[in-house]
């Protein structure tokens, strides 16, 4: 149970906010180097964090090391420490460094390195080359999570159980096309670094079609994950997902597959502080699981999360430079 | 209402600045339905927490609507004819930038089924809901200290009884004047919603750019006025 709880609550290093559709951001590409979201922020992403998401900030505080360094045109840097407090134990679940070098913002080289979990297991979970025209097209090759459903920072079991858990970033080649109304992406999943060691074969593909009607503050679509099993048969995992923000302070998220479903309400009564009740039912659960997430981003470089279920609580502290 | 061209005072537009009716009662019912469907009170402690969260959700869902309605009533008492908003797109990411609350005053006359008028949009009242972005918009790009208003003039625009029609006029913005034309929707003979597109470069406005995100040069303008 402890392992499942830890797995569920380990805030994925992706740390993206798809609910930012409420600010007019239908995708993640404005704020993140990775157009799928998560990971190192662009200078614009840091600025948006400060302007729209944290309770307080001073001018330039969002920049590297509290504004000690000004934004660079060539390199974006991130370093994250996440500390987990459970009733039974506490430990740092992530200590990670990521950087993204670019040539005119059209060609990128991204790499991360860190230590994870209570045993400080070293790993390099994301490294890829990317080319983009910064408007309609992205192509990436390397190790990362391919596009599938809502790439939320609170990764629920529905997502984690489908090969998107901590450390399950795969080698992929992915292409994305986007315009004002639609995003189409497809990725070939080419394996996982641990396949040889454990004799597994993590191969397949993902695809996602998202509809993002301008002004509707809505992102919805269908995803498909297909992984080959040991006998060479393709195991399909289709899913529907939607994020809708009728108001800036209120949004809804949902994702549902054949055996899994998830629904969350997000309320932000005060800027930077949000309350997110949710219900989730996956193939691993006998009964639906209810919980409430409280999240506070008081200032840039720090945020805190508390999760309450009927019988347990979890706190997570996140520091980043 | 005065048809001779005097500024209409104490008007109460029957249109909602946010673009749709915002009924607190309907929102409360929706919130309650969602809550009932998703969560079932089964224990006292849990039920109390859920009740509290329900009340919080309801308060947040309705506060936005109430604030907007109050704001529109206050502005109406100041003699405004309506509001203007703009929609722009930024890349990467096709982010939508919306600016609204641009108050409109002006003079107009409706005679013989034709509208002639001059409408001033107060650019200082525009808001994109982000302080830094508003500051850049007004100081760096629109230069509202030098050019505090945009003026849309129309002459002898033929009005239908109700429904869609085309309009043509001139827009003065940032010290330059260009032809402007677009589509309008007229409801109940007094409520106008007109949309047209402009190119920022036609008005000498530099293409906005901030930390790698660039705004597309074409911007959509929406003007909502009540002209009785």
Image (spheres, helix red, strand yellow):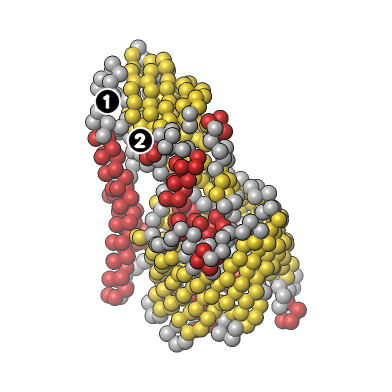
Q: Secondary structure at mark 1?
A: loop
Q: Residue at x 61, y 72 (%)?
A: A97
Residue B103 marker:
2
Task: Name the spot of residue B202 as percent of width and height, x first.
Answer: 56, 30
Give left or right: position of A72 versus B2: right
Give the quarter of the figure containing the N terminus of chain B.
Answer: top left
Residue B89 vertical placement versus A263 (above, below): above
Q: Residue at x 60, y 83 (%)?
A: A120
Q: Residues within 10 Å of mark 2 (few under 14, many from 20)?
A: many
Chain at numbered mark 1: B
Marks 1 and 2 sit apart, C-alpha to C-alpha, by 14 Å
Residue B91 vertical placement versus A234 (above, below): above
The residue most toward the top is: B112
* A315 or A252, nearer to the observer: A315
Chain at numbered mark 2: B
Q: Residue at x 65, y 70 (%)?
A: A112
The numbered mark, 1 or 2, whose residue comes first in the sequence reads 1
Q: Residue at x 48, y 46 (%)?
A: B136
Residue A66 vertical placement versus B194 (above, below): below
**Pointer 1 and pointer 2: residues touching (CB < 8 Å)?**
no
Residue B8 marker:
1
Pointers 1 and 2 within a single chain: yes
């Amino acid at each position: 149970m402890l392992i499942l709880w830890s797995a569920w609550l380990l805030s994925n290093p992706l740390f993206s906010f798809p609910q930012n559709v409420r600010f007019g951001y239908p995708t993640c590409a404005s704020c993140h180097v990775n157009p799928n979201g998560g990971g190192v922020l662009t200078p614009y992403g840091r600025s948006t964090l400060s302007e729209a998401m944290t309770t307080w900030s001073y001018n330039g505080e969002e920049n590297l090391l509290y504004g000690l360094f000004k934004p660079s045109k060539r390199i974006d840097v991130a370093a994250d420490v996440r500390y987990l407090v459970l009733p039974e134990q506490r430990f740092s679940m992530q200590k990670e460094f990521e950087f993204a070098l670019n040539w005119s913002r059209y060609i990128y080289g991204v790499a991360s390195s860190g230590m994870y979990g209570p045993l400080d297991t070293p790993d390099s979970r994301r490294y890829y080359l990317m080319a983009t025209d910064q408007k309609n097209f992205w192509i990436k090759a390397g190790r990362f999570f391919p596009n599938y459903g809502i790439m939320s920072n609170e990764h629920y079991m529905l997502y984690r159980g489908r090969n998107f858990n901590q450390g399950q970033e795969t080698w992929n080649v992915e292409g994305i096309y986007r315009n004002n109304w639609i995003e189409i992406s497809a990725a070939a999943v080419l394996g996982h670094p641990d396949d040889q060691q454990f004799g597994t074969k993590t191969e397949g593909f993902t695809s996602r079609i998202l509809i993002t009607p301008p002004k509707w503050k809505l992102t919805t679509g269908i995803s498909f994950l297909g992984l080959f099993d040991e006998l060479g048969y393709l195991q399909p995992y289709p899913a529907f997902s939607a994020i809708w923000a009728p108001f800036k302070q209120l949004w809804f998220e949902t994702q549902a597959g054949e055996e899994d479903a998830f629904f969350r309400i997000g309320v932000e009564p005060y800027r930077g502080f949000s309350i997110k009740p949710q219900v989730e039912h996956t193939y691993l659960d006998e009964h639906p699981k209810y919980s409430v997430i409280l999240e506070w981003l008081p200032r840039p470089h720090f945020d805190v999360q508390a999760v309450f279920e009927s019988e347990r609580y979890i706190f997570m502290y996140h520091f980043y430079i | 209402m005065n048809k001779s061209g005097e500024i209409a005072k104490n008007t109460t537009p029957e249109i909602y600045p946010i673009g749709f009716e915002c009924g607190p009662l309907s929102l409360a019912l929706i919130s309650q339905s969602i809550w009932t469907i998703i969560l079932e009170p089964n224990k006292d402690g849990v039920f109390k927490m859920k009740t509290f969260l329900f009340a919080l959700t309801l308060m947040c869902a309705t506060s936005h609507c109430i604030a907007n309605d109050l704001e529109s009533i206050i502005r109406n008492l100041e003699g405004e004819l309506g509001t203007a908003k703009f929609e722009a797109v930024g890349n990467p990411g096709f982010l939508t930038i919306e600016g609204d609350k641009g108050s409109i005053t002006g003079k107009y006359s409706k005679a013989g089924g034709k509208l002639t008028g001059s409408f001033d949009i107060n650019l200082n009242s525009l808001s994109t809901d982000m302080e830094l972005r508003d500051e850049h918009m007004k100081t760096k790009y629109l230069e509202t200290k030098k050019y505090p208003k945009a003026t849309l003039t129309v002459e002898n625009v033929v009005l239908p009884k109700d429904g869609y029609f085309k309009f043509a006029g001139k827009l003065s913005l940032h010290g330059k004047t260009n032809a402007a034309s677009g589509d309008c929707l007229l409801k109940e003979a007094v409520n106008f919603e007109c949309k047209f597109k402009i190119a920022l470069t036609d008005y000498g406005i530099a293409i906005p750019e901030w930390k790698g995100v660039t705004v597309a040069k074409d911007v959509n303008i929406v003007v909502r006025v009540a002209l009785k």
